[in-house]
Image: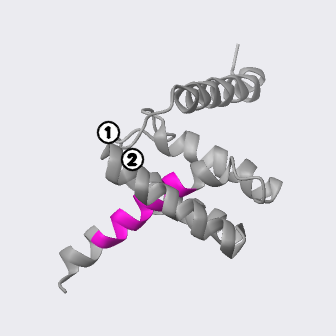
Amino acid sequence: MNIGDSLKAWAQRIKRDGLTLWFAARHPDAPWYAKALGLFVVAYALSPIDLIPDFIPVLGYVDDVLLLPALIWLTVALLPTAVLAQCRAQADAWIIENGSRPSSKAGAVMIVVLWIALGIAAWLWLAPRLPG
């Protein structure tokens, strides 16, 4: 197995586990903190808007390559083994049936609100320091 195949398999697992978190957020036996983090991660992953836009050189892909997989790994680690197995089976079935990943309008709204909040915070911090 060459490095290209390894990366493709890793990307497939990340995609499946992202969808797994969607099902885990609705599972009655998942702990509340895993559900909360899972919903955040899924909303962000499915959002058409990134926290760091992809057109920014190098940094634009940091969230896609490092942040998102790390958050998925953390959330999967918080899930009980039985819940994880059931939700992975549901995710595999969904991928076979639908093929493509869903999108989240709520995730897009969340990212826009976050950018607006960061802009307001920056303005409130910088405005008193501006000359004039």
Q: Position of residue 40 (x, y in %)?
A: 65, 44
Question: Type of residue at label 2?
Answer: Gly
Magenta stretch, residue numbers:
9-20
- Give the side of residue 34 with respect to residue 19, left or right: right
- Structural crowding at the residue carrying mark 1, measured as other residues with C-alpha within 10 Å and reported as few (<14), some (14–19) or many (≥20): few
Viewer-proximal residue among 6 and 20: 20
Above or below, 1 relative to 8? below
Q: On the picture, is 49 further left or further right than 29?
A: left
Q: Please give the label number shown on residue 60.
A: 2
Residue 15, image x, y percentages = 41, 57
Magenta region includes residue 19:
yes
Amino acid tagged 1? Phe
* Residue assigned mark 1: 55
Classify mark 2: residues with Cα within 10 Å, few (<14), some (14-19) or many (20+): some
Mark 1 to mark 2 CA distance (whole Å): 6 Å
What predominant SS class does the magenta segment belong to? helix
